Amino acid sequence: MTAPLATPKKKNPVQRTRLATLPPGARSRSALGLTRAAAEGRFELQVCADCATVQYPPREVCGHCLSEQLDWQTVDNHGELIATTTLRHSNDLYFRERLPWRVGTVKMAAGPVVVAHVHEDCAASGTVRLTLKLDRSGQAVLHALPEQDTPNMNDAAQLRESTCDPKHRRVLVTDGKSAMGIAVARAMLDAGAAAVFLGDPTPWKTVAAYDTLIEDERVQPVDLDVTDTDSVDRLAASIGGKVDLLVNTASYLRGNPGEGGILGRKDVILARDAMEVNVLGLMRLAQAFGPGMRFRAADGTNHAVAWVNILSIHALAPLPARGAWSASMAAALSAALTLRAELAGTGVRVVNIFPGPIDEEWEQLTPPPKLSPAAVAKAIIHALKDGVEDVYVGDIAEEIRARLRENHKAVERELGQ
Amino acid sequence: MTQPVLAQFMTELLSGRLKLVDLTQTLAPEFPTIVLPPEFGQAWPFRVEEISRYDERGPAWYWNNFSMSEHTGTHFDAPIHWVTGKDQPNNAVDSIPVDNFIAAACVINTSAESADNPDFLLTIDYVTRWEEQHGRIPERAWVLMRTDWSKRATPKDYLNMAEDGAHSPGPDAEVVPWLIRERNVHGFGTESIGTDAGQAHHLNPPYPCHYYMHGNNRYGLQCLTNLDQLPPQGAVIFAAPLKIRNGSGSPLRVLALAPSA
Ligand SMILES: [Zn+2]
């Protein structure tokens, strides 16, 4: 059984910080279908529309009947482990540093025989669960897990290579005075984070929940206003080498629905203030904290691992009643995708969260269902532990996401009403 | 044979018998800006972005872009800032006659009272007792209320927010019209974030300093510092706002000339 992950030792300051290496990242266009599923935590393989064969690895045509009608579908992820081996030698730089590495062959109930990374808690034979997870290159890989969860299974070294578990990690929560920041900080502590740096954008304002949180010795209050370049730079100069996980909770939403469009207002100040926090704030944080995280992407068991952006489903489809804010969310998503590409070379994962409306002050007039900040925080922890990178939280977000695939014009017309 | 007056002035200044006192707070991002209820539009705080610093963005020069509202940092309020002053002549920073940018100053020290009571209000009675000691306020002089608020250690202490809003000293609703009617003052200046007290929305009229001063085409100065270095009477203030077209106010450098102690 997996031993619980030991508390990482303090870093030896005279030892060189090892740079990150990555597993092989090249994939065929067809194989990126697996990456799409893994990014959202689904288990999908190609299924032939003509002969119903479940196919792996993905190809352009069906290996059985040569049909080009291949759909990506959720399939039964169970199988029998028929052979395992533990690699003790590799010429690949990434695997070489992580040996021994257990792999095996699984005969899936759905048909295909696949090669997968095999969890240390899997018996040498028997039923396993297959999952698709992103590796440090951001590409889908198959992990075979025990049929039932085992204690500490998330602590297994091989599995941790595909996840971003907060356990023993130090987390920067950029706005710790918002309801979302407080919920995220609490969730991180509950998930075993070693430390939370809790940003304070408004030192003049008393927030009781913030004051309670900073009584916890694991929580360190820090001044941080993402609209102030100097404030961001000063904090990075002080703690930039200790941030393993960054959750950007700084978010700007003002105005009641219907006041926030474009023609409904007389000025662009609200739009500009939203851009200042939601877009430029993200970029300032990236320029200040990105280099340190990139450098520390292989720095011990608690290496820098993920950057989380809390966006909105309206980054994908604007809510005209909040048009200026929606534009800032779309711009933030675009910036987040650039950051993902820029950090990809080191294995630091950018996780984007797309919630529906959140139960907060400026959504007072928005009818339910609304998500509690705690529900979003919970989804973030799940995403980090499961190793996914795109998360749609709540019924509204999931529905808009599904309907965008089905008919994006319908979404456009209906949200405009 | 007396010297021409400006030559005499320079002699006094260079000899050190006259001193210049900087009444201006440093513009920095962390300096607080007034906070209105969140459903209203908000003033931008001071923000700065480096354009280049002898680097690839500009090899031999250093410069910054900055942004802020007209009412950020040590700043001047023009009459057009308040609805009561909207129809006054020459009421914006670009149209105020330049001779209004130099005026004498009376400094009323309320620092002891303000230390005891953050909601301290300046009254007619307080001013007349001050006049008994320091002489009558001359015509067209700034009245500066010294509270030592500028010495407060942190932005939190400076804004002094409670659940019922900010708590900082200012004038009461009677003394402002009295200063205009009876003393024909030039304007009113404070060390705190506004010319009115933190709780001035509860006065009648709300924000009496803004209401009466601007309604009578007078001016305001706020976020001043170093008032403790000025004599009660005898200082002269140079306070010229930026020439913003139709501007309601502006950050500025406020300088005082005063006899050395
Ligand atoms: Zn087929």
Image: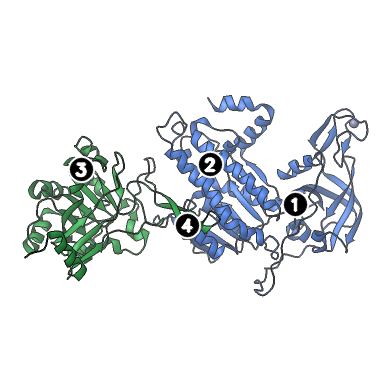
Residue A13: where, in percent of width, then height? 64, 73
Q: Which residue is mark 3?
A: B214
Could you tell me which secondary element the residue under label 3 belongs to?
helix
The answer to whether the residue labelled 2 contacts the one labelled 1, judged by CB atoms less than 8 Å apart, is no
Give, as a three-letter code, the residue at label 3. Answer: His
- Point out which mark residue A331 bears: none
The chain letter for the residue carrying disc 4 is B
The chain letter for the residue carrying disc 1 is A
Could you tell me which secondary element the residue under label 4 belongs to?
strand
Q: Which residue is depicted at the point 24% across and 63% down? A: B21
Give, as a three-letter code, the residue at label 4. Answer: Trp
Please identify which colour was used for chain B in the image.
green
Residue A20 placement: quadrant: bottom right
Ligand 1 is found in which quarter of the picture? top right
- Identify by letter the chain in blue: A
User: Can residue B175 be seen in the rendering of this structure?
Assistant: yes
Residue A386 position (above or below residue B4): above
Look at discs 3 and 4 and give the one toward the viewer: 4
Cα distance between the residues tagged 3 and 4: 42 Å
Question: Could you confirm whether marks 4 and 2 are on the same chain?
Answer: no
Look at discs 2 and 1 and give the one toward the viewer: 1
Q: Residue furthest bottom?
A: A14
Residue A45: where, in percent of width, then height? 82, 39
Q: Which residue is mark 4?
A: B61
